[in-house]
Amino acid sequence: MFLEIEDYLFDCQSRGLSHKTLKNYRNHLIRFEKYIIGQKIDEMRKIQPIHIKKFMKLKQDEGCTNTYCNSIYKVLKVFFEYCIENEYIIKNPMKNITPAREEKKIIEVFNDKEVNRLINYYDYNNYLNARNKAIVNMMFDTGIRTTELISITNDDIQVDRIKINGKGAKERFVALSVELKKVLRRYEKIKSNYFYGKDIPNNYFLSRTGRRLTVETIERIFKIAGEECKVRENIRCTGHTARHYFATKMMQTHDIYTVQKMLGHSSIQNTEKYIATLTDEKLIDKGKITSPLMNLKGGRK
């Protein structure tokens, strides 16, 4: 492996990037390195823009989507900026290379009837059902990521909010609604009885044997509920789609910057994709709610 790549990945690790992000960076950079070596290039400073363009074209010819190619583009862009900052290279070969044009797609999310069936699918008959019900309700009501949910501890559940440990070790708080609190209180009572007298970790959600949950477990919980609740076939029943549902609902009543904070997005561009979900009717309804004149009139005494 090129020293520059090894150094960059170590820097990413030292900055606390998630395992998933590190794996993604490593895979993209190793594939790029393999291509560069195949072009008889043995030093990073010898890489030219044409080499990067040919590599990106190769990925497209292999059938990779523009979205996937742009994920490679972003990794290479940041990597070469790192090389410039650390004086590994003098000229940035990515400087005049632009990302591929992506087709903007409207995000397909659950409808209200599907969500109503999903949040009521699991009951309180036993610990696993109560836990699963709490998980599904929390993800729909807060829009948190699956990785954030499995990291929640008992101490993170507060009176009217939940502390979330987000990407890049960034903390934020999400609201704990009255309805969600009711579900969590019933779950906590069942959990307390189920694990009574047992030594368990401080994680809020635990497996049947008292271990921390995995992302795969959460996805399985949603998949089972989705199949039983007859969710439309074109909708992926996952925790991430629940996050999409939350985001589209928040966009109807909040400004984009508030939604960005709620979702824990580091870039506003990640939040902008939800704007496309706002139909003309929803925009009109939102305009009625946020009308300055109506709010001033309503605020008079």
Image (spheres, rainbow, N blue to C red):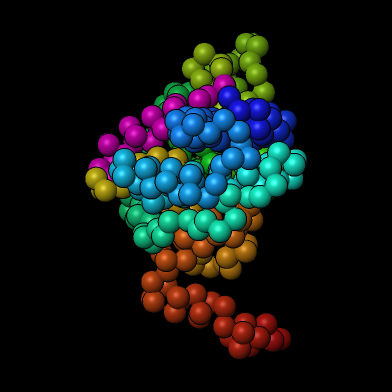
At horizontal 62% and vertical 64% (from top left) the residue drawn is 257
> Which sits in the foreground, 261 or 153?
261
Estimate the x, y position of residue 245 in percent, counting from the top left.
Answer: 44, 53
Horizontal placement of 65 versus 48: left or right? left
Queried whether the magenta region covers residue 178, the answer comes back as no
Horizontal placement of 180 versus 224: left or right? right
Estimate the x, y position of residue 153 in percent, counting from the top left.
Answer: 66, 30
Estimate the x, y position of residue 200 in percent, counting from the top left.
Answer: 63, 15
- Quadrant housing residue 5: top right
Q: Is residue 283 above or below residue 113?
A: below
Q: Quarter of the image containing the C terminus?
A: bottom right
Q: Is residue 90 above or below residue 223?
A: below
Estimate the x, y position of residue 148 in percent, counting from the top left.
Answer: 59, 37
Which stretch is magenta? 212-231
Count of picture labels: 0
At horizontal 53% and vertical 24% (from top left) the residue drawn is 213
User: Does residue 130 appear in this view?
Assistant: no
Main SS category, magenta section: helix
